[in-house]
């Protein structure tokens, strides 16, 4: 016998899965979330949220709590050590955007607070439950889940796979993850250090053919994220042995305390469809990008929000199921036309090896440093990742604040 677990079963308790669960729960949809791990992952991942994401957090009712835990950024730093170039660009937003330019906080905190709010809305979150099979018919989906008690069958009307780039859901429904993986890996680290005293702004790009990195403040208590790249052919199990040499470049001999670290593979991939019958994909299970420029979680969250909106409408009988095909097409378009090109260019800027291109990049960064509003476009561009909201009356229909006059 299968256990009925509601209208929607979400696989994956990362930030996209939990925010999507909260958004669905707020519309009255009955949701269960399952997660193979025994807790929300606290591995270093996304850390900086721009106004388009703050808008989501605000409308879901959790921004104030995250603001209290995190820090606001007002500077974007560009560093090209070989040229002795360092510029801290002030970053602001137009008056009609009611959010800080950037919010700095670990994605585990976002997930934790989203889960607490979702549970208050009746969302059932189950850890230690690993998906092993899916079987769908015209009326719903049966998921076979492995727990410490054994195998269980869970029955829901719909399934959302938000279980990461290695998605079990995507594999079980036979959807290709088209694109490529990069020949280098990123190592994300959390460290206590006085990076501000070392000349770093709230968020920074260190552009260097060997020592490229993204360095960002995580909170107001001295915790910072240093994410650097290394050759993926190096043995991943020994990455910690190489970390001190990298830190010596970024921090010199400044005192510091390493808190956490995590290596991960970089992808530019998108599922060939985000819908197969009653099973849908969101977050990194749908599309995965290198994290340069913060395009990954930003796109993933908006994919989850658009999906929660259209799926809730289908469940309520306010939209035909075909709108889910439009959802798939539009979110794939957003990824390939906007997310992936911008993230790829940001990665190129960080790691460029050609000396001629590096000089061109230097000239461009010098020009930006001379423009007091140059940083504004960086934090406003992600509003474009909202795309077509697909449905009249959508709660997100007015979310693209970059479309208003005065954006600049």
Image (cartoon, grey):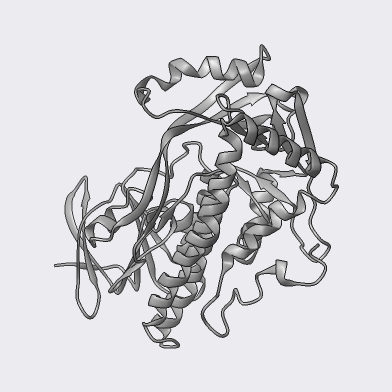
Residue positioned most to the left: 1
Give the residue displayed 59% in from the left and 26% down from the top.
191
Residue 98's image quarter?
Answer: bottom right
Q: Is residue 74 left or right of residue 228?
A: right
Give the residue displayed 69% in from the left and 33% down from the top.
359
Quadrant of the image for the N terminus?
A: bottom left
- In the foreground, 132 or 274: 274
The spot of residue 210 in percent (x, y) is 55, 24
Q: Is residue 136 left or right of residue 363?
A: left
Q: Is residue 329 left or right of residue 398?
A: left
- The reply to whether residue 206 is in sight is no
- In the foreground, 51 or 130: 51
Give the residue displayed 44% in from the left and 65% down from the top.
332
The spot of residue 358 in percent (x, y) is 65, 33
Quadrant of the image for the C terminus?
A: bottom right
The spot of residue 149 in percent (x, y) is 19, 48
Residue 218's image quarter?
Answer: top right
The spot of residue 19 in percent (x, y) is 50, 60
- In the foreground, 116 or 242: 242
Give the residue displayed 22% in from the left and 58% down from the top.
172
Residue positioned most to the top: 253
For residue 184, above or below residue 122: above
């Amino acid at each position: 016998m299968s256990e009925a677990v509601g209208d929607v079963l979400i696989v994956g308790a990362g930030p996209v899965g939990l925010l999507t669960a909260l958004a669905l729960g707020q519309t009255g949809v009955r949701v269960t979330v399952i997660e193979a791990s025994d807790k929300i992952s606290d591995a270093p991942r996304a850390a900086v949220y721009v106004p388009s994401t703050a808008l989501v957090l605000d409308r879901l009712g959790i921004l104030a709590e995250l603001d209290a835990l995190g820090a606001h950024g007002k500077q974007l730093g560009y560093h090209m050590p070989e040229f002795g170039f360092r510029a801290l660009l002030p970053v602001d937003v137009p008056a009609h955007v009611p959010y800080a330019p950037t919010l700095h906080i670990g994605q585990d905190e976002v997930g934790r607070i989203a889960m607490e709010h979702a549970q208050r809305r009746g969302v059932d979150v189950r850890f230690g439950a690993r998906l092993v099979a899916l079987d769908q018919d015209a009326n719903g989906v049966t998921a076979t889940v492995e727990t410490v008690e054994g195998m269980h069958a869970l029955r829901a009307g719909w399934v959302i796979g938000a279980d990461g780039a290695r998605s079990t859901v995507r594999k079980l429904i036979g959807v290709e993850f088209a694109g490529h993986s990069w020949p280098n890996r990123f190592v994300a680290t959390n460290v206590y250090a006085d990076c501000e005293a070392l000349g770093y702004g709230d968020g920074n790009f260190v552009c260097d053919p060997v020592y490229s990195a993204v360095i960002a403040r995580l909170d107001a208590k001295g915790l910072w994220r240093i994410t650097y790249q290394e050759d993926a052919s190096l043995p991943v199990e020994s990455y910690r042995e190489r970390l001190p040499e990298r830190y010596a470049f970024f921090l010199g001999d400044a005192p510091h305390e390493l808190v956490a670290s995590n290596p991960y593979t970089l992808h530019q991939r998108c599922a060939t469809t985000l819908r197969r019958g009653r099973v849908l994909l969101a977050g990194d299970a749908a599309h995965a990008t290198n994290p340069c420029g913060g395009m990954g979680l930003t796109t993933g969250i908006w994919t989850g929000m658009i999906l929660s909106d259209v799926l809730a409408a289908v469940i309520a009988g306010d939209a035909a199921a075909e709108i889910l095909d439009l959802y798939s097409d539009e979110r794939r378009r957003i990824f390939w036309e906007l997310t992936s090109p911008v993230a790829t260019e940001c990665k190129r800027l960080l790691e460029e090896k050609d000396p001629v291109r590096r000089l061109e990049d230097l000239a461009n960064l010098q020009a930006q440093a001379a423009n007091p509003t140059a940083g504004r476009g960086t934090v406003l561009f992600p509003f474009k990742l909202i795309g077509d909201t697909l449905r009249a009356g959508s709660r997100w229909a007015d979310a693209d604040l970059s479309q208003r006059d005065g954006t600049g």
